[in-house]
Amino acid sequence: MSATGSRPDPTSPTPTSAAHAGDPEAPTQERIIRRVMLTHSLSVRDVCIIILTVLAVFYSLYFAAEIVLPFVFATVVNLLMVTPMRMLHNRFHVPKPLAALFLIAAMFVFVAGIGTAISVPAAAWLSEVPHSIPVIQKKLAYLHGPFEAVYTAYDRTVAMFFTGSSRHGITAPADFMAFGHIGTAVLTGTRAFMGEFFTMLLMLFFLMTEGDSLLRRVVEIMPTYADKRRMVQIVSQIERNVSLYLATITIMNLLVGILNFLQCWLTGMPNPLLWGVLAFLLNYVPIIGPLTGVVVYLFVGMFTFSSSLYALLPPAIYLCIHILEGETITPMLLAKRFTLNPVLVMASLMFWDWMWGISGVFLSVPMLAVFKIFCDHIDALTPIGHLLGGPVRPRSLRTIGAPVEVK
């Protein structure tokens, strides 16, 4: 996901606007929203019950993350696999279980291959970070005065609340012990990640093979024909728009990773594959991801090159690639879509980062887009869907301060 721009939203016009597109007497979305606001008045008791219910749901999601996260990831990846799965099953008549196993195996080989290729250079680079810090300090010596002023103000502020707390109390051995603790934490996190990853693969297999059957069962238990039709519309729109969105941004992010791999190789950056993969992953996170990539490229350039001016070249090229992809190419591929409000996109990123960590960051925008589709199809939630939407005029989700269009 991209960080300084916007991507078109994977949502499409509301069912009401689509159904009445050819009827000049049909009520507009604004009239529907006004009618809902007038007919659904809430008392203080209702508002309190809704707030407590939402808090209970989020509380459960926080403490049940180990169970919920693999299922959510499997659902999102299933949307990405819908098109190749149906092509294998419908066009080439491959049985669903075999097609699912083939696609999951291909994804596993891709992820494992990338992880194996970058694990050794990543570990080597992390081990060199403590020894490279003095080099950075020397290159940034001209900023010593401003930084010292900030540190002094920080020490005075901390001393007002905590006795004996100071940044100067941190010793060099403690710094190196911290890096040892980081290594232990990484190993523990990797073990937990692999457990959740295999759980996700198992859930993904059953979603790919039995997802259509489950949807039929859900439609069958809907009480009225209108409810059945609405459920089919919601699922079809999520599947069509979100899967197209995920497939498009995955291809574009892959191109961004390849271009950054080439520019790192040409400029002499160490381990270009590592930084290319990092650019590919960070581009899934809107706004924050590419900004993080620019900072990382800047520090790696400072570690690598003797000239501070030349160290600015890799992050500058990274930023140009991102702007070209986020402001030109992707908006052309995903045009004629609504946008999501950039304030709510950032709020969603920060909230799900607090809730589920880095996994929540990657899932925040797809979940927000799916939630908007549900709101657009349910009359009582139409005002919320309208609030989530940005300007109709399509722009790219990656310009800071601009209306964010979802990835």
Image (cartoon, rainbow, N blue to C red):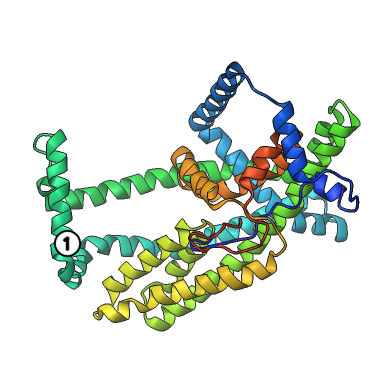
The residue under label 1 is: 146
Position of residue 303 measured from the top left corner of the image (x, y, whole percent): 27, 71
**SS for tag 1?**
helix
Query: Which residue occupies 56% across, 39% down?
Result: 69
Packing grade of label 1 (10 A; few <14, some 14-19, many >=20) is few
Query: Which residue is the extreme one toward the top?
Result: 45
The answer to whether 333 appears left or right of 152 in the picture is right
**Residue 361 coordinates in the image, percent (x, y):** 50, 48
Q: Quadrant of residue 226?
A: top right
Q: Is residue 359 visible?
A: no
At 73% across and 42% down in the image, what residue appears? Answer: 376
**Viewer-proximal residue among 211 and 199:** 211
Q: Is residue 317 above or below residue 22?
A: below
Q: Would you identify the image quadrant in which residue 244 lies?
A: bottom right
- Taking 181 as reference, is 11 left or right? right
Residue 292: percent from left, percent from top: 41, 60
